[in-house]
Image (tube, rainbow, N blue to C red):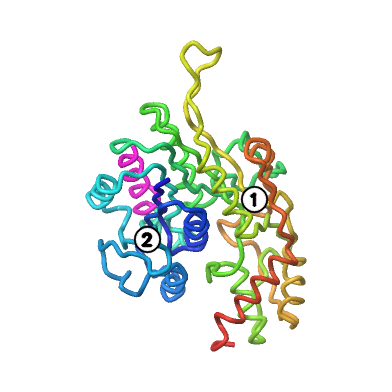
Amino acid sequence: MKILITGTAGFIGSFLAKKLLERGDTVVGIDNINDYYDVELKYSRLKESGISREAENWNVLQKSSLFPNYSFIRMNLEDKNAIDNLFEAEKFDAVCNLAAQAGVRYSLENPTAYINSNIVGFVNILEACRNHPVQHLVYASSSSVYGNSSKMPLSVTDSVDNPVSLYAATKKSNELMAHTYSHLFELPTTGLRFFTVYGPWGRPDMAPIIFASSISQGKPIKVFNHGDLERDFTYIDDIVEGVVRVIDSPPKTKKPDAAEVSIPYSIYNIGNGNPVKLMDFIETMENAVGKKAIKEFYPMQPGDVYKTFADVSALKENFNYTPDTSIQKGLTEFIRWFKSYYSDKL
C-alpha cells in the first residue's frame, strides 16, 4: 500500500513509518517540525529513517537514504492547497493522521495552536481524503476525551461529553468530524484513543524523559496529586503493532438490504489495559536508572485526570491485539536509549 503518515517527525509517527517500510509499504511522511519541544529530537528521529537535515525546507519532497520507498515533506496541515496538491500527486491508498498539537497543560497557554492544527488541519485531511478517495483514514484521538470519568475501565461506549482540557475537546471534535464524513461520503475512518505511550525516542515533555533526566542529574521530580495517579502506560512497539493492524482493516458499510445499515466508522481504545500507579512507575524507573528520585509532591494540575485504564477488548477481539510489554521491560529499553541519546547531558 501507499500510505500517508502525518507527524512522522513525532514519536509514534516515526516508529509507525519504519514498521510499515520494513514490511514493504510505500510511505510518504509529513510534519511541520514545530518547536513545541526540542526540534533536534525530531530531526534525529527523521535521521533514523534516512531523512537528512534538508527536511527543514518547506514543501520539498525528500527521498530517504535508507528506505527507497520513503519520502518526507515538511508541511503544515493548515496549508490546504499544499495538502490537496500532495494528495493529487501521490494517490494514497490509506492515511494515518498522527500530527496534532499535543499536550494538555500547554493548551492552557496557547489554545489557538490546538484549533489551527487539530481542527483546521484535520478538516483539511478529511477534505483531501474525500476529494482524492482513500481506502481508509486512521487518526489519533486520545484517552483524554474521557475527562475525569470515575468508571473503570474506560470503554468506547462511555460518554465523552465532558472534556477537562481544550486538547481533549479538539480530539472529541475530530471523532465527530470523522463520523460526519463517514456518514455523508462513506469515507472509512477509524479513530484510535491512545493511552499513555512511552518508549525510546519519546516526547521530552512527558513524564518518562522528565523523570529520567531529573533522577539521573540528582534533581527533584514533581509528583502531582501527591503521587495518587494511575496511567495505562503502553510501550511504543505494542502501540505500533495495533495501529498497523487497524490500517489494514477499514470498517465496512453494510448494504442497504442488510438488517441494520451502518456507516464505515469505528473508534477503539489502544492501550495496555493494565494501569500502573505513578509511584510504582517511579520506583521501576529508579531501578532502571540505578538511582533514587528526589520527590517533590504537588496537588492535581488543571486539565489532568486521576486515572486512565483502557478497555481494549474490542481491539483484541477484532484485531487479535495483545500488548505484552511489561513496564519493567519497557522502562529498561527506554532508559538504555535515554542514556545513549542524552549521554552528553548527564
Which comes sooner in the sequence, label 2 or label 1? Answer: 2
Q: Is residue 198 above or below residue 38?
A: above
Q: Position of residue 95 (x, y in %)?
A: 41, 46
In the picture, measured across the screen, residue 67 lies left or right of residue 290, that is left
Q: Position of residue 163 (x, y in %)?
A: 54, 46
Along the line of sight, which residue is nearer the eye, 184 or 119? 184
At x 60% / y 54%, what residue is drawn?
239
At x 39% / y 47%, what residue is drawn?
2
Residue underneath mark 1:
271
Q: Which secondary structure, mark 2?
A: strand
Circle 1 residues within 10 Å: few <14, some 14–19, many ≥20:
many
Along the line of sight, which residue is nearer the eye, 14 or 70? 70
In the picture, measured across the screen, residue 181 lies left or right of residue 334, that is left
Quarter containing the N terminus: top left
The label on residue 31 is 2
The amino acid on which the numbered mark 2 sits, given as a three-letter code, is: Asp
Q: Is residue 238 above or below residue 178?
A: below
The amino acid on which the numbered mark 1 sits, given as a three-letter code, is: Gly
Gap in Å between the C-alphas at discs 2 and 1? 24 Å
Q: Which secondary structure, mark 1?
A: loop
Circle 2 residues within 10 Å: few <14, some 14–19, many ≥20:
many
Q: Position of residue 296 (x, y in %)?
A: 69, 76
Quarter containing the C terminus: bottom right
Looking at the rendering, the stretch of residues picked out in magenta corresponds to 115-129
In the picture, measured across the screen, residue 237 lies left or right of residue 98, that is right
The chief SS type of the magenta part is: helix
